[in-house]
Image (tube, helix red, strand yellow):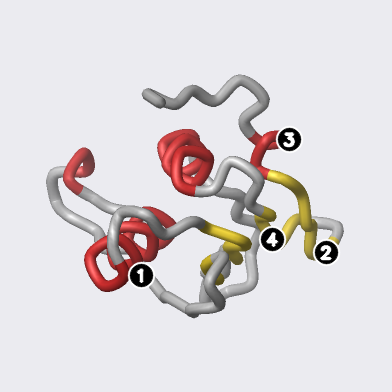
Amino acid sequence: MLTRDGHVVTGCNVENASYGLTICAERSAIFSMISQLGPKMSIRAIAVVNGDNLPCSPCGACRQVIFEFGPDAMVLFPTAEGWEETAITNLLPHGFRLK
């Protein structure tokens, strides 16, 4: 993930036997960004990858969190046809914010 201030932050998927406690790499990176750099940081771009280079767009929960911390962020991810680059608002057209 690339922040608006030029920092690169990584995250990883953490599986758990209780599936609801699993965390996706996207949210892991965002929460690390906040932990390391503060709550005012904003996402410029985030890339989603996996070890097998399989199609993998962000899940719904990740889309909402990406939108909240980067409402104009670009999202890059592999599809069956190759890499896609799109705005988070295309993936979550009606995201919401508390502010």
What residue type is disc 4 on?
Leu
Q: Which residue is mark 4?
A: 76
The first of marks 3 and 4 along the sequence is 4
What's the distance in space between the residues labelled 2 and 1, CA to CA?
22 Å
What residue type is disc 2 on?
Gly
Element carrying mark 3: helix
Q: Which residue is mark 3?
A: 90
Q: Which mark is residue 82?
A: 2
The first of marks 1 and 4 along the sequence is 1
Badge 1 vs badge 4, beta-carbon distance below 8 Å:
no
- For the residue pair 9 and 97, the one nearer the viewer reads as 97
Badge 2 vs badge 1, beta-carbon distance below 8 Å:
no
The first of marks 1 and 3 along the sequence is 1
The reply, left or right, for residue 32 in relation to residue 62 is left
Locate residue 41, reporting x and y percent.
41, 59
What residue type is disc 1 on?
Cys
Q: From what the image shows, is residue 82 above or below residue 23?
A: below
What's the distance in space between the residues labelled 1 and 3, CA to CA?
24 Å
What's the distance in space between the residues labelled 1 and 4, CA to CA?
16 Å
Residue drawn at (64%, 72%), measured in percent from left and top? 53
What's the distance in space between the residues labelled 3 and 4, CA to CA?
12 Å
